[in-house]
Image: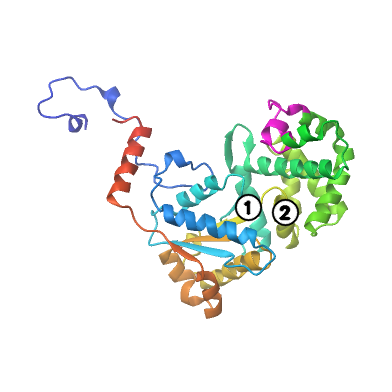
Amino acid sequence: AVSEFQTSESHEPHQESALPGVNPFTQDVCPGPYGVTEENSVGALNADVLERLSQAVDEQQQSAGRASGQPLVLLTAPRAGYGKTHLLGRMTASGGTHWLILPLAFRMGDEVTRVNVARRGLEALERAETGEEGWSMLREASAGVVATLLRQLIRSGKLPCANPEQALRVLSGPAKEIFSSGGQAHLIGEWLRKHVTQLRKPMAELASRTTGVVTPSEAEIWLQAFIAQGLDGQGAGVAGLRQLATQSEEGCGIVMKLLGLWRPVVVLVDHLDGFYRNAEAGLQIATLLLDLAELDGHPVVLSLNQDVWQATFGHHLPSALEDRLTASRLLLRGLTEEEATELVKLRLNRAGVE
């Protein structure tokens, strides 16, 4: 195998250490949208689709509560391997502080219900890493909700503050600087921990009034879990959040509304291959997602390969439902020669192969 890397004119002894330790092309599956970065992507690949996808989500958020365009975007590819999940990861990264992506992948045996939307969504956020040790997207979102409520209390004058401008500036910055013990603004986090009992009630009243989906006493229970997760991470507050979100069908809407205090929630549905040729499940999934998008006002991106679309959705749906699903449809294309070359070079460079 080593001789394949040498020319017939070469008389230098081969150096096995010069060969790559890792095959640059073995990682051909993107597990989820979090962790994808633009610097490790081919920028030109489906750039037009990425732009249209991001614009569609932004437009739906801006028109929430009013007559809007298409709340659900259908992203399809001719077959597996065209980079749907990777593209969704680039959308997640490019969204920055615009939205919170809630990945949703039903497992085999899951009932297609709002309860499982909440369960799988929270699990995905808990697993999603942010590049900071012990700092998952669930902790980031939980801390963001708490910081948002504190800012609003300061602005309204209900939370006295010696230097409100400075406090608002810090609370608008990265949440981990406040809630992480090593953060530059960790003193605010320590102050919150010390006064959490007194703060929870006014924060709950504000959350109840803003979202309109929970009473102040209910909101206080939810916030207890959010605060625990934001301050301590790991498993703190997770069991409480999971129980609250899955104890009834209403829990799904509540957790998304509360997370939306920080950033608007975008539901991203991917990896539905396990429902191949299950037309009954396809009808349930289509109905549920359209309800989330149209009734609850949460933008939804549904990602499918063409074979799954045809066998599970497509003509198996009532025509009116199919029209609503396909009204905003984006199709991935294949690689151009230039993009393929850039992709190969990118993989080789990352593996340290000249």
- Can residue 194 be seen here? The reply is yes
The residue under label 1 is: 121
Q: Quadrant of the C terminus?
A: top left
In this rendering, the answer to whether 211 lies above or below 310 is above
In this rendering, the answer to whether 341 lies above or below 247 is above
The residue under label 2 is: 255
Between circles 1 and 2, the one closer to the viewer is 2
What's under tag 2, amino acid-wise? Val
The verdict on residue 262 being magenta is: no
Q: Measuring from the top left, give residue 36's x and y in whole percent.
A: 49, 43
What's under tag 1, amino acid-wise? Gly
Please tell me whether mark 1 sits on a helix, a strand or a loop: helix
Please tell me whether mark 2 sits on a helix, a strand or a loop: helix
Name the residue located 78 percent from the left edge and 41 percent from the top edge: 151
- Do labels 1 and 2 touch, CB within 8 Å? yes
The stretch of residues the image draws in magenta is 170-187
Q: Is residue 318 left or right of residue 234?
A: left
Q: Quadrant of the N terminus?
A: top left
Q: Nearer the viewer, residue 111 or 183?
A: 183
Residue found farthest to the front: 165
Q: Quadrant of residue 248?
A: bottom right
Name the residue located 76 percent from the left edge and 53 percent from the top edge: 244
Q: Is residue 253 left or right of residue 310?
A: right
